[in-house]
Image (cartoon, helix red, strand yellow):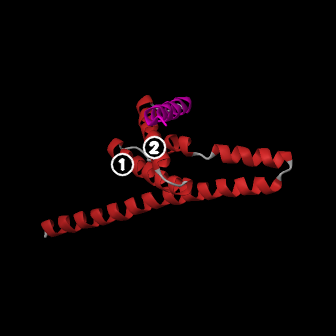
Amino acid sequence: MNFIYIFLVCILVSFFIGISMHAKPWVSFLGGLVGGVGYLVYLICPSPRAGYLLSALVLTLLSEILARLCKMPSNNFLVLGIYPLVPGTALYQTMAYAVQGDYLKALEKGGEALVCIVLMTVSIALVPTVFRIVLGERKKRSRRRLQMNED
């Protein structure tokens, strides 16, 4: 598997989705980089479920870091970066099996897609929470220092 080719395709896909959503070009490019790195993490992981969990963690962490550096909301980078990870094939196969009347396979593929989506959701919710806790503690310490210096 050619990881460089896949990385570049992920960057381009996310970039052009950002452009179509009227995002600034540099935000689209950074979102594409985030998406490419997230998808590479997914490919490196041994199982798809671990891949979705870890790649969404990395993706969200990079989005939070870029948000702090660029002084923008992290959703700008996260929404663009998540596109390569969406389990579209499993969702498509779920619908195809349901239309064909093979409901057991549809449930199997739908459950698989749902598990992947839940794993990504947990990752996306976990990282900002940890960031807020850590940054909240840092702000409290800096306030205490300021109060001690004023006294």
Of the residues tagged 1 and 2, which is closer to the observer?
Answer: 2
- N-terminal-most mark, 1 or 2: 2
Under tag 1, what secondary structure?
Answer: helix
The quadrant in which residue 137 appears is bottom left
Quadrant location of the C terminus? bottom left
Question: Which residue is nearer to you in this view: 38 or 27?
Answer: 38
Residue 105's x, y, as percent? 77, 54
Direction front: furthest residue:
1
- Read off the residue under disc 1: 65
Q: Residue 68, can we see it?
A: yes
Q: Residue 75, can we see it?
A: no
Which residue type does callout 1 highlight? Ile
x 76%, y 57%: residue: 107
Give the Cα separation between the discs numbered 1 and 2. Answer: 18 Å
Q: Are marks 1 and 2 in contact (CB under 8 Å)?
A: no
Question: Which residue is nearer to you in this view: 119 or 129?
Answer: 119
- Read off the residue under disc 2: 40
Residue 112's x, y, as percent? 66, 56
x 40%, y 31%: residue: 26
Residue 13 sits inside the magenta stretch: yes
Taking the image as shown, residue 27 lies to the left or right of residue 79, namely: left
Question: Which residue is nearer to you in this view: 69 or 49?
Answer: 49
The quadrant in which residue 92 appears is top right
Question: Which residue is nearer to you in this view: 51 or 150?
Answer: 51
Which residue type does callout 2 highlight? Leu
Residue 115's x, y, as percent? 62, 59
Please report the bounds of the magenta region as a residue range: 1-21
